[in-house]
Image (cartoon, rainbow, N blue to C red):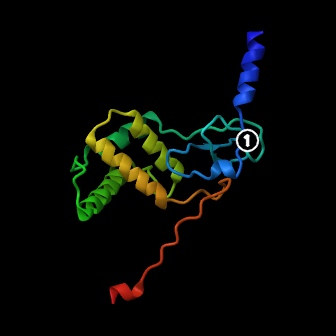
C-alpha cells in the first residue's frame, strides 16, 4: 500500500514544462536536460522532458575537481568588499575571469548550464565575501550567456549594438 502511495505521490509531482513555465529565466531557475533526446529546459519542480516525455531531467553539477578548481580561483580574488566604484568592479570581474581561465580551464562563459553550476556550487560552499563577489559575477555572466541551440523556449540574447560614433 505504501509503495502505491509513493508512486502516486511521485506521479503527482512530475510535470511537463510549458512555454509559460520557461518565462522566469534567471540564474536560480534550474536548468535540466534529457539524456534521451538531449534537450535543455528550465523547471523549479521535478520535470519530465518536454520533447520526449520519456524520463525525468538531470541537472548539470560540477564534479569534485571542478569545485576545487572553482574555489581556488575564488580564493585568489584580490578584493573582498562590496564598496566598489564601477571601474573597480569591472577590473575585478576581468581579473576573476582570468583566474577562472587559469584555475578552471573547463569554465565556459557562454554556457548558461556551466555558469549556473558554478553559481550553485558557490551557494553551497562556505559564505565568504569573496564567494559573495564570485556569485555576483556568475549572476551577471548568466545574463550575457546564450541558451544552447537545443533549449526548449530559448531566451533571446540581448542585442548589443556598438555605437561607432561614440569612439570618434
Residue 16 spot, x, y in % from top left? 73, 41
Residue shown at the point (41%, 33%) measured from the top left = 124
Query: Does any portion of residue 73 appear in the rendered image?
Result: no
Residue under the point 55% across and 45% down: 29
Instruction: Find disc 1 in the rendering and name its residue.
Output: 16
Report which quarter residue 17 is drawn in: top right
Q: Quick check: 130 above or below 146?
A: above
Residue 63 visible here: yes
Q: Is residue 114 left or right of residue 86?
A: right
**Picture quadrant of residue 8:** top right
State which quarter of the image contains the C terminus: bottom left
Horizontal and vertical percent position of residue 145: 50, 59
33 sits to left or right of 146: right
Q: Position of residue 41 (x, y in %)?
A: 64, 48
State whether residue 2 is above or below residue 59: above
Report the side of 163 relative to 46 (left or right).
Answer: left
- Residue at horizontal 68%, vertical 53%? 152
In the image, 73 versus 103, the foreground residue is 73
Q: As drawn, is 132 to the left or to the right of 62?
A: left
- How dense is the environment of label 1, judged by Cα within 10 Å: few (below 14), some, or many (20 and up)? some
- Residue that appears at 47% across and 58% down: 143
Helix, strand or loop for disc 1? loop
Q: Quadrant of the N terminus?
A: top right
Residue 114 image offset from top left, x and y in percent: 49, 48
Total label count? 1
Amino acid at each position: 500500500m505504501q509503495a502505491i502511495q509513493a508512486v502516486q505521490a511521485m506521479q503527482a509531482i512530475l510535470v511537463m514544462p510549458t512555454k509559460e513555465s520557461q518565462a522566469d529565466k534567471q540564474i536560480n531557475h534550474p536548468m535540466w536536460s534529457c539524456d534521451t533526446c538531449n534537450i535543455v529546459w528550465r523547471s523549479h519542480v521535478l520535470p519530465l522532458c518536454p520533447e520526449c516525455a520519456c524520463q525525468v531531467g538531470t541537472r548539470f553539477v560540477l564534479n569534485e575537481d571542478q569545485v576545487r578548481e572553482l574555489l581556488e580561483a575564488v580564493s585568489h580574488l584580490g578584493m573582498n568588499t562590496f564598496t566598489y566604484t564601477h571601474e573597480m568592479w569591472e577590473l575585478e570581474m576581468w581579473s576573476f575571469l582570468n583566474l577562472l581561465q587559469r584555475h578552471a580551464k573547463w569554465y565556459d562563459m557562454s554556457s548558461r548550464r556551466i555558469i549556473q553550476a558554478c553559481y550553485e556550487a558557490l551557494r553551497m560552499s562556505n559564505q565568504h565575501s569573496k564567494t559573495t563577489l564570485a556569485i555576483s559575477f556568475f549572476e551577471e555572466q548568466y545574463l550575457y550567456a546564450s541558451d544552447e541551440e537545443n533549449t526548449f523556449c530559448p531566451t533571446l540574447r540581448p542585442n548589443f549594438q556598438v555605437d561607432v560614433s561614440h569612439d570618434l
